[in-house]
Amino acid sequence: MKNKRREFLKTACAPVVLSVLGIPLVAACSSDEDAEEPLAQGSIEIDLSQSQFRALEGVNGWINYTAEKLLLIRVSTSEILAFNNACPHQGNRNGWSLQNNSFICSYHGREFSADCNGSLQCYTTAISGNTLTVSR
């Protein structure tokens, strides 16, 4: 029994353990499990004709492409910007919205510019036909 309890305490999330012990804790936001994983270097080719990329057909269309950990936004008919979708605050990846040319992290409300001059890591992109190439 002691070993099971010790293993639980080693692997449990700190806020859960503290709340079980009766210690109040308010977390500002939580981070995704894979936030610490490094992104693969090199190029990614994305077929924009696939239905999951339909939102990128028009200017200002955007998606959170979680399979490749990217935020994608079409800024013109010939340009799509790509960003690492990890929030610079705590690494959250799945709670994004876009308002007034800023990505907003829903975990804590911080805004990050949807251009390559902001806090989000921006990658080089190129479009050829229906293929978007993102270089990391």
Image (cartoon, rainbow, N blue to C red):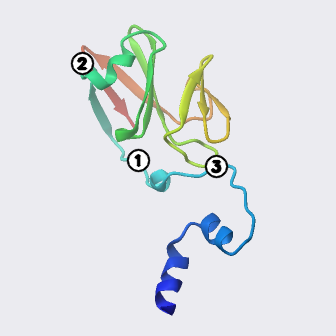
Give the residue type at disc 1. Leu
Q: Secondary structure at mark 1?
A: loop
Q: Secondary structure at mark 2?
A: loop
| Residue appearing at x 56%, y 52% in the figure | 31
* Closest to the observer, 14 or 114: 14
Say which residue label 2 marks.
49
x and y percentages locating residue 105 in the rendered image? 60, 36
The quarter of the picture where residue 132 lies is top left
| Residue farthest toward the bottom in the current orientation of the protein | 2
The quarter of the picture where residue 44 lies is top left
Say which residue label 3 marks.
29
Alpha carbons under labels 2 and 3: distance apart: 35 Å
* Closest to the observer, 109 or 91: 109
Whether label 2 touches label 3, CB < 8 Å: no
**Where 119 sits versus 127, above or below?**
below
Q: Which mark is residue 39?
A: 1
Mark before the other along the chain sequence, 2 or 3: 3
Give the residue type at disc 3. Cys
Alpha carbons under labels 3 and 1: distance apart: 22 Å
x and y percentages locating residue 33 in the rendered image? 47, 56
**Where 126 sits versus 119, above or below?**
above
Whether label 1 touches label 2, CB < 8 Å: no
